[in-house]
Amino acid sequence: MDIRVYEIKVTVQPKPVKAQIEIHCPARSKLEQPIPVYNNSEKDTSIRPVLNAYEYSHYFEKSNRELFVKRRSQGNYILKFAPDNVCKAEAKLTLVNPVTNDIFEYEITAHGEEP
C-alpha cells in the first residue's frame, strides 16, 4: 500500500476594484476630493497610495504617505488638484492594502476650467 501526503499552499490575488473619477475645478483654485477607504477587518491596516499622473502631472499633489485605517472604521485619502490654467489632466490612483492584497484603481480625469 502506498500512502502519500501532500501539502499545498495557495496564494490568491484578488482582482483590482476599478472606478473612474471626473473632477471639474476652476483654474487657479484648489480642489480636495476625499476618497473613502473602509477597513472591515479585525486588524488595523495601512493603505499604500500610488498616484501616477500623466500630462499636467504637476497639478496633482502627490502624497505617497501611507494612510492608517483602524479596524472596523473608515479613513479618507485626500486627492488634491490645483490647476494653474485651463487644462485636462489624467492620472491613475492605486490604493493597496498590503494585509489583504486588495487593490483599488481609480482612473482620474480632471478638468481645469475658466474661473
Image: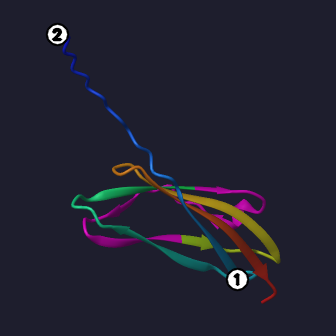
Specify the color scheme: rainbow
Q: Quadrant of the N terminus?
A: top left
Coordinates of residue 56 in the picture (x, y in percent): 76, 63
The answer to whether 47 is drawn above or below residue 11 in the figure is below
Q: Splitting the image into 4 quarters, where does residue 105 fall?
A: bottom right
Q: In terms of depth relative to the viewer, which is nearer, 29 or 50?
A: 50
Q: Is residue 9 above or below residue 28?
A: above
Residue type pointed to by label 1: Cys
Q: What is the secondary structure assignment of the residue under circle 2?
A: loop
Element on which disc 1 rests = strand
Magenta part of the chain: 51-78
The answer to which of marks 2 and 1 sits earlier in the sequence is: 2
Q: Residue at x 40, y 43 (%)?
A: 12
Say which residue appears at 29% left-offset and 72% top-offset: 73
Residue bearing the label numbered 1 = 25
Instruction: Give yes or no for residue 54 being in the magenta stretch.
Output: yes
The number of numbered badges drawn on the structure is 2
Q: Amino acid at mark 2?
A: Met
Does residue 10 appear left or right of residue 104 in this picture? left
Task: Give me the disc on residue 34.
Answer: none
Quarter of the image holding residue 88?
A: bottom right
Residue 100 pos. (x, y %): 35, 51
Residue, disc 2: 1
Query: Is residue 14 found inside the magenta-colored segment of the image?
Result: no
Q: Are marks 2 and 1 in contact (CB under 8 Å)?
A: no
The residue positioned 29% from the left and 67% from the top of the image is: 40
The x and y percentages for residue 34 are 50, 76
Q: Residues within 10 Å of mark 2 (few under 14, many from 20)?
A: few
Taking the image as shown, residue 96 lies to the left or right of residue 110, namely left
